Amino acid sequence: MTSSIKWQIKRFNELSLQELYSLLKLRSHVFVVEQNCVYQDIDGKDEKAIHLLGEYDGEIVAYARLFKAGDYFENASIGRVVIHPEARDKKFGHAMMQEAIKAIETHFDATKITISAQLYLKKFYESHDFVQTSEMYLEDDIPHIEMKRG
């Protein structure tokens, strides 16, 4: 029997302690340990965001935080996009982006979205109709580009 991913959208104050711990653990596992990047992940912006959680076999394996226009960029935005390394072969990233875009449209009544994308994921985001709108820049010593949709 194959499990499927279960998506949830929650505001910060709706997250259980276990969910908060799990999503912070996932972000730390990928952004700090796997990418070998020392940076301040807990940046004071989680309280403003709505949180997209993807649960598979009882674990949060996919996550993104979503912001309304003006909270991060001029447009609505998607950030902290992460898939657990052991779940990447399941292609949850594409499903997560579809869910994130749909959630921004539903919760924020917005179609214009700006992201700060890691450069190596440019083609992935282009497959979701994002276009590059900046030159490469370093964010926490990792090459990024700004991309927009809509």
Image (cartoon, helix red, strand yellow):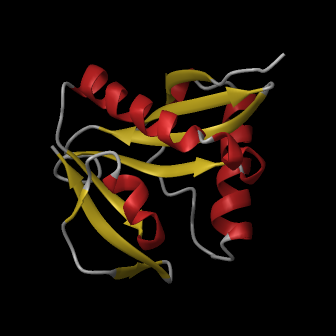
Determine whether, in the image, residue 134 is placed left or right of residue 91. Answer: left
* Residue 130 sits above or below residue 106 on the image: below
**Residue 121, percent from left and from top:** 45, 63
**Residue 100, percent from left and from top:** 40, 34
**Residue 52, percent from left and from top:** 51, 32
Q: Quadrant of residue 122?
A: bottom left
Q: Could you tell me which residue is drawn at 64 percent across and 53 percent down?
A: 27
Query: Which residue in the rendered view is the most extreme toward the right?
Result: 1
Q: Quadrant of residue 91?
A: top right
Determine whether, in the image, residue 39 is placed left or right of residue 135. Answer: right
Q: Could you tell me which residue is drawn at 58 percent across and 50 percent down?
A: 82
Q: Could you tell me which residue is drawn at 20 percent across and 42 percent down?
A: 69
* Residue 66 sits above or below residue 120 on the image: above
* Residue 18 sits above or below residue 26 on the image: above
Determine whether, in the image, residue 101 is placed left or right of residue 94. Answer: left
Q: Could you tell me which residue is drawn at 74 percent across and 68 percent down?
A: 33
Determine whether, in the image, residue 52 is placed left or right of residue 79. Answer: right
* Residue 44 sits above or below residue 52 on the image: below
Q: Quadrant of the N terminus?
A: top right
Q: Quadrant of the C terminus?
A: top left
**Residue 134 visible in rendering:** yes
**Residue 48 visible in rendering:** no
